[in-house]
Amino acid sequence: MNGTVEIDLTINGAETRIAAEPETPLLYILRNDLCLNSPKYGCGLGECGACAVLIDDHAARSCTVPVGALSGKSVTTLEGLGTTTSPHPVQTAFIENQAAQCGYCLNGMIITIVALLKRTSSPSEDDIRNALRHNLCRCGTHMEILAAARSAAEMCRNEANDGREELQ
Ligand code: FES
């Protein structure tokens, strides 16, 4: 293929070398080449959030990120957060709050809340709503999603407190 370059980055904790044209959207590489299918193709324009991933702990829309810009970066997808037997607390919160109907937006919702909780362990209601305001859900599951985000924040705070108590 003309213009193919090699890019070294970390994906879900594993050092990975990708051969691709640098302008290829990260989303295509994740889904088509690496079979990481949690990021979804929604709008393809950076507007819906379905394709979100973490890049160095910040939520990013993988449909608009050229893979050539990711040399040396760390990408985490939903697959890298937890497993079915040991889910991330945010994944647990979404399951417990049944915060899905069709589920297409869930990847972006969860990734966005994980990124928010990396920035602040005690997000306000406004913080949660502002973080999620550009993630689209067409089913109308917004109340359950907000409830899941609140309980995820509480779970993460409790985990952090437990960790501190163990160290004392
Ligand atoms: Fe990337 Fe919609 S598919 S933001």
Image: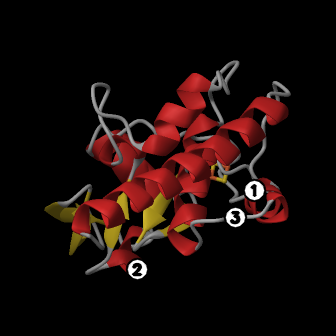
Left or right for 125, reference 6: right
Q: Is mark 1 within 8 Å of ligand 1?
A: yes
Answer yes or no: do the residues labelled 2 and 3 have beta carbons within 8 Å?
no
Please name the amino acid that badge 2 sits on. Ala
Report the Cα–Cα distance between label 2 and label 3.
30 Å
Which quadrant: the N terminus?
Answer: bottom left
Q: Who's the residue at 67% across and 27% down the image?
A: 99
Q: Who's the residue at 26% across and 70% down the image?
A: 168
For residue 38, say whether it is visible: yes
Expressed as whole percent of the image width and height from the top left, the position of residue 5 reads: 23, 74
**How many residues crowd mark 1 within 10 Å: few (<14), some (14–19), many (20+)?**
some
Marks 2 and 3, the one that precedes in the sequence? 2
Answer yes or no: do the residues labelled 3 and 1 have beta carbons within 8 Å?
no
Marks 3 and 1, the one that precedes in the sequence? 1
Q: Which mark is residue 69?
A: 2
Q: Which mark is residue 123?
A: 3
**How many residues crowd mark 3 within 10 Å: few (<14), some (14–19), many (20+)?**
some
